[in-house]
Image: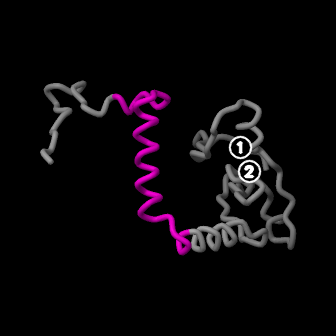
């Protein structure tokens, strides 16, 4: 199979795979279906299913320790579990976090937002303005 060096700096729009940019296009969707079939034929086994189920059980445990980031006087966390696969962006105080059951304030429920807006939202992180006042 010959390597196609396109696109090039001289002709940046000469891309033989530009059709993949039409993410809802019939050709692109057929290509994705073909790749999925090839992947499943190669990797979808009982071992894969067992590993997938084991990892899901670990990630969805309610007693997972939340990974937090501090902004101002508050601790922030994106929480994902079986009920919130896209996640909950939430915050609490350090005092509350140190208790057995912290009181989390839900700032954004990505699953509810996705359902409401009929969009497939995913978490890309949060950005804040440097030195901005953050209430805690």
In front here: 78 or 22? 22
Q: Is residue 45 magenta?
A: yes
Coloring scheme used: one colour
The mark found on residue 19 in the picture is none
* Label 2 packing within 10 angstroms: few (<14), some (14-19), many (20+): many
Residue 12: image x %, image y %?
Answer: 22, 27
Instruction: Kindly state the secondary structure of the residue where label 2 is placed.
Output: strand
- Residue 6 placement (x, y as % from top left): 18, 34
Q: Position of residue 131 (x, y in %)?
A: 61, 43
**73 relative to 37 in the view: left or right:** right
- Foreground pick, 109 / 135: 109
- The boundaries of the magenta stretch are 19-48
Q: Is residue 71 magenta?
A: no
Instruction: Tell me if 38 is positioned left or right of 97 in this view.
Output: left
Residue 28, by quadrant, is: top left
121 is higher (above) or lower (below) than 83: above
Q: Secondary structure at mark 1?
A: helix
Q: Which mark is residue 110?
A: 1
Q: Is residue 40 left or right of residue 10?
A: right
Q: Residue at x 74, y 53 (%)?
A: 84
Q: Label 2, on which residue?
A: 88
Q: Which residue occupies 73% across, 44% down?
A: 111
Q: Are marks 2 and 1 in contact (CB under 8 Å)?
A: yes
Classify 114 as above or below 13: below
Please rate how many residues cluster around mark 1, counting C-alpha atoms within 10 Å: few if below 14, some from 14 to 19, many from 20.
many
Quadrant of residue 92 within the rendered picture? bottom right
Question: Mark 1 or mark 2, which is nearer the start of the sequence?
Answer: 2
Give the residue displayed 83% in from the left and 51% down from the top. 105
At horizontal 67% and vertical 61% (from top left) the residue drawn is 68
Taking depth in this image into account, of 47 and 91 the one nearest to the observer is 47
Find the distance from the CA under tag 2 to the CA under tag 1. Answer: 6 Å
Residue 130 in the image: x percent, y percent?
Answer: 58, 42
């Amino acid at each position: 199979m010959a390597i196609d060096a396109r696109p090039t700096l001289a002709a940046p729009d000469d891309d033989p795979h530009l059709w993949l940019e039409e993410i809802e296009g019939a050709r692109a969707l057929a290509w994705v279906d073909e790749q999925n079939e090839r992947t499943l034929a190669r990797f979808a086994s009982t071992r894969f299913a067992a590993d997938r189920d084991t990892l899901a059980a670990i990630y969805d445990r309610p007693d997972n320790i939340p990974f937090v980031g501090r902004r101002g006087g508050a601790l922030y966390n994106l929480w994902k579990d079986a009920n919130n696969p896209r996640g909950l962006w939430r915050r609490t105080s350090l005092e509350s976090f140190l208790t057995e059951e912290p009181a989390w304030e839900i700032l954004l429920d990505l699953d509810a937002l996705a359902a409401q807006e009929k969009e497939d939202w995913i978490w890309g992180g949060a950005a804040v303005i440097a030195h901005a006042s953050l209430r805690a």
